[in-house]
Amino acid sequence: MGRAFEYRRAAKEKRWDKMSKVFPKLAKIITVAAKQGGTDSQTNSKLRTAILNAKAQNMPKDNIEAAIKRAAGKDEQDIKEIHYEGKAPHGALIFVECATDNPTRTVANVKAHFGKCGGQIVQNGSLEFMFSRKAVFEFEKPANLSKDELELALIDGGLEELDENDGIFYAYAAYSDFGSLSSALELLRIEPKKSALEYIPNTPVEFSEEQLADIEKLIDRLEDDDDVQAVYTNIA
């Protein structure tokens, strides 16, 4: 994956630490998953993943259970998953995933973030061909398996690529193979630290340090927004 992979990994880890400490965001993801597929994590893989990611960020069990219960509440507002596409300063491409009970508020805020940082929202679908949606799993290196053995064991689960960095593995598959790759990891008794469906740039672009500083201002504003769940870019 080269420099593009290194940037995405480092940037993602830095921002994940910042975002994942905000338990309400994690709770919202859990509630959405439970409303869409039911409150049983054994049969709802999306909920199981949301719970796994919350636990990886040390979200208390009581908070997780409360988020699941809210999905069954009659008075619970309907939370929608929506995304926006835009261009940051210097032409960087941005995908913004949100979960919101008020899309009017969310789109106004997202537009404001882009506008104040010299970017702009574009019509949804405009940038999709620039990204591939991938299932991504992060887990510690198993003590009993080499990288080659892991690849062989996971290939039937849809594995497309397996990267390793400092004892941490990153497994990639097509988004449609999220469930099958998750099951393959379970069979190996590997519990991912994090898992998600992510937008990976097909053609990463390099920017100067000065340009990156401008782009980061927009990304930081977006990730500070309560409705924003994830931000993806084409930065190399």
Image (cartoon, rainbow, N blue to C red):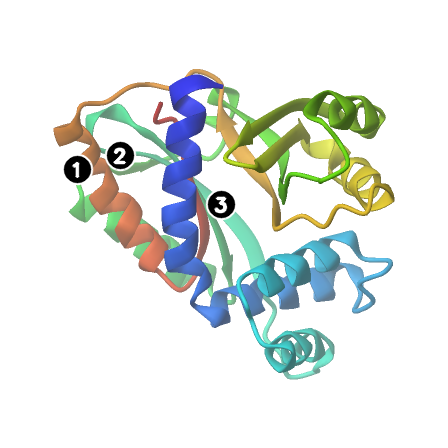
Amino acid type of the residue tagged 2 in the rendering:
Ala
Rendered-image quadrant of the C terminus: top left
- Confirm or deny contact between disc 2 and disc 1 (CB under 8 A): yes
Amino acid type of the residue tagged 1 in the rendering:
Asp
Q: Residue at x 33, y 18 (%)?
A: 205
Mark 1–mark 3 Cα distance, whole angstroms, equals: 22 Å
Q: Earlier in the sequence, mark 2 or mark 3?
A: 3
Mark 2 crowd level (few <14, some 14–19, many ≥20, 10 Å Cα): many
Q: Which of 204/167 is in front? A: 167
Q: Which residue is drawn at 39% across and 38% down?
A: 10
* Left or right side of 36 for 225: left
Quadrant assignment, res 178: top right
Element type at marker 1? helix
Picture disc at residue 214? 1
* Image position of 54 with respect to 85: above or below: below
Quadrant assignment, res 223: bottom left
Farthest residue to the left: give it: 210
Q: Which residue is drawn at 75% across and 46% down?
A: 190
Q: Earlier in the sequence, mark 2 or mark 1?
A: 2
Mark 1 crowd level (few <14, some 14–19, many ≥20, 10 Å Cα): some
**Residue labelled with disc 3:** 83
* Image position of 225 with respect to 138: above or below: below
Residue 220 location in percent, x, y?
28, 50
Residue 176 location in percent, x, y?
74, 33
Q: Which of 19/113 is in front? A: 19
* Left or right side of 13 for 66: right
Quadrant assignment, res 75: bottom right
Q: Residue at x 38, y 26 (%)?
A: 234
Residue 127 location in percent, x, y?
45, 26
Which is more foreground, mark 1 or mark 3?
1
Picture disc at residue 88? 2
- Confirm or deny contact between disc 1 and disc 3 (CB under 8 A): no
